[in-house]
Every structure is written in C-alpha cells, then in structure tokens.
Amino acid sequence: MKNAKKLAVAAGVVASLVVPVLAFAQLPTIAPSPNVAGPVTGTQSFINLVNQILFYVAVLFWILAAGFVFYAAILYVTAAGNEDQVHKASHTLL
C-alpha cells in the first residue's frame, strides 16, 4: 500500500512536469510577410487602432481630472479662510 501511494505521488509529479511541456509543443506559426507597411491592414484594423488610441486618451483624461479634483480639495482644506486661495481652488475645480 505504501508503494502504491509513493508511485501515485511520483506519477503526479511527473505528470505535472510533463503536461506544460506538451502544451508548448505546438507547430510553428508562419511569420508575417515583410511587405506589411504597418499595423493597419484594413478598415477594421484601422478602426481598432483608433479605438485603442481613444481609450488611452480617455484614461489619461480621467487620471488628470482626478488629479485636479484632489489638488482643488487640498487647496480648499488648506485655505484657512484665505479668500484668494478659496477662489483659486474653485477655479481649479471648474
């Protein structure tokens, strides 16, 4: 019985080492031809490229917007009754 458990554990260890190797044993893919001028190969790929660019611009916009809101909040909190700093904070927020 002890030998069967040892054999089962050894088989499990060997299988866990062999299965990932088999997953990487794929046929090589064909490399794209060197005549491709760029990432845009058609209308749909152009639309995908524009969507990616707009997504990154939107992410950058929201990060900057959050930064300005936090900056305005810090100005409001640290104004301590100073009207100029409150005015600056309100204009930063708007």
Image (cartoon, rainbow, N blue to C red):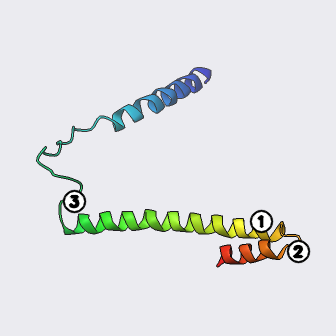
Amino acid type, callout 3: Val
Checking the image for residue 74, the label placed there is 1
Residue at image position (22%, 38%) is: 27
| Label 3: element kind | loop
Residue at image position (33%, 36%) is: 24
Where residue 92 appears, as percent x and y from the top left, is 67, 73
Q: Nearer the viewer, residue 58 or 33?
A: 58
Amino acid type, callout 1: Ile
Total residue callouts: 3
Of callouts 1 and 3, which one flags the residue occurring earlier in the amino acid sequence? 3
Checking the image for residue 40, the label placed there is 3
| Label 2: element kind | loop
Residues at circles 1 and 3 in contact by the CB criterion of under 8 Å: no
**Is 22 rendered above or below residue 73?**
above
Of callouts 2 and 3, which one flags the residue occurring earlier in the amino acid sequence? 3
Amino acid type, callout 2: Gly
Where residue 74 appears, as percent x and y from the top left, is 77, 65
Checking the image for residue 19, the label placed there is none
The mark closer to the camera, 2 or 1, is 2
Find the distance from the CA under tag 2 to the CA under tag 1: 13 Å
Residue bearing mark 2: 81
